[in-house]
Amino acid sequence: KQEVTQIPAALSVPEGENLVLNCSFTDSAIYNLQWFRQDPGKGLTSLLLIQSSQREQTSGRLNASLDKSSGRSTLYIAASQPGDSATYLCAVRRNDMRFGAGTRLTVKP
Amino acid sequence: EPEVTQTPSHQVTQMGQEVILRCVPISNHLYFYWYRQILGQKVEFLVSFYNNEISEKSEIFDDQFSVERPDGSNFTLKIRSTKLEDSAMYFCASSPSSGTDTQYFGPGTRLTVL
């Protein structure tokens, strides 16, 4: 059964810092991996989707990498801003989609 | 930009009652999904729907649950006889042309079962 783990559970950084969020999964037979942002009490906003054949995807200040064989993905956020404060979720897709518990990020002004 | 919408935003019901949660997926999308998130827990997959039938469902999606696309725009989740443990945030999602595409999520319906 696919298990998805995110480390750390919470992270607090000063504005402007670069940071890395980690996601690991136990079964490498995936179609893709998706990173989401969730604001308190709100829905999920898709940030990046990496297909199983890809190694990374970039969007603005965000860069996500995927190492399928080792069951790892990272989300790199450059020059963090207070508006980046949210919970970041990774999810892996095979027949269903399995989510990690998320990393709660706080960026302090 | 097109969005997935869900109604109501908050539903309160008594245990044993039936509820229907409604979703309007993005108009040209073909794959539809329901997820739930119990407070403080992970987002959990419930069901995926394509071509007017269920394509995948989780162990959570038992006989108490059903989904329907009653017309060309709505996608509904029905819970036949609600239990206290059904209290959660329910998210609808849709994706364009393939089950491996980006999924776009709605804002959710908070279901409270008393």
Image (cartoon, coloured by chain):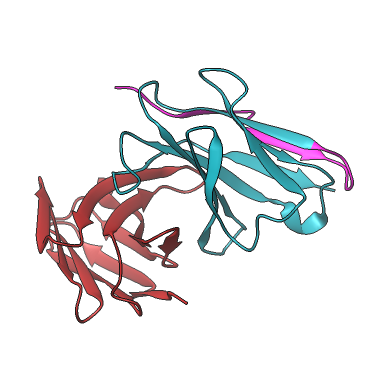
Chain colours: A red, B cyan
Of residues A88 and B76, the one drawn nearer to the viewer in this rendering: B76
Based on the picture, tell me whether residue B112 belongs to the magenta stretch: no
Of residues B54 and A36, the one drawn nearer to the viewer in this rendering: B54
B11 left or right, relative to A2: right
Residue found 17% across the figure and 55% down from its top:
A80
Based on the picture, tell me whether residue B2 belongs to the magenta stretch: yes
| Percent coordinates x, y for residue B78 in the rendering | 71, 38
Residue found 29% across the figure and 55% down from its top:
A34
B12 left or right, relative to B99: right
Of residues B68 and B78, the one drawn nearer to the viewer in this rendering: B68
On the question of residue A78 being in view, the answer is: no
| Percent coordinates x, y for residue A28 in the rendering | 28, 75
Say which quarter of the image contains residue B80: top right
Residue found 82% across the figure and 38% down from its top:
B18
Q: The N terminus of chain B lies in which quarter of the figure?
A: top left
On the question of residue A101 being in view, the answer is: yes
Which segment did they paint magenta?
A: B1-18
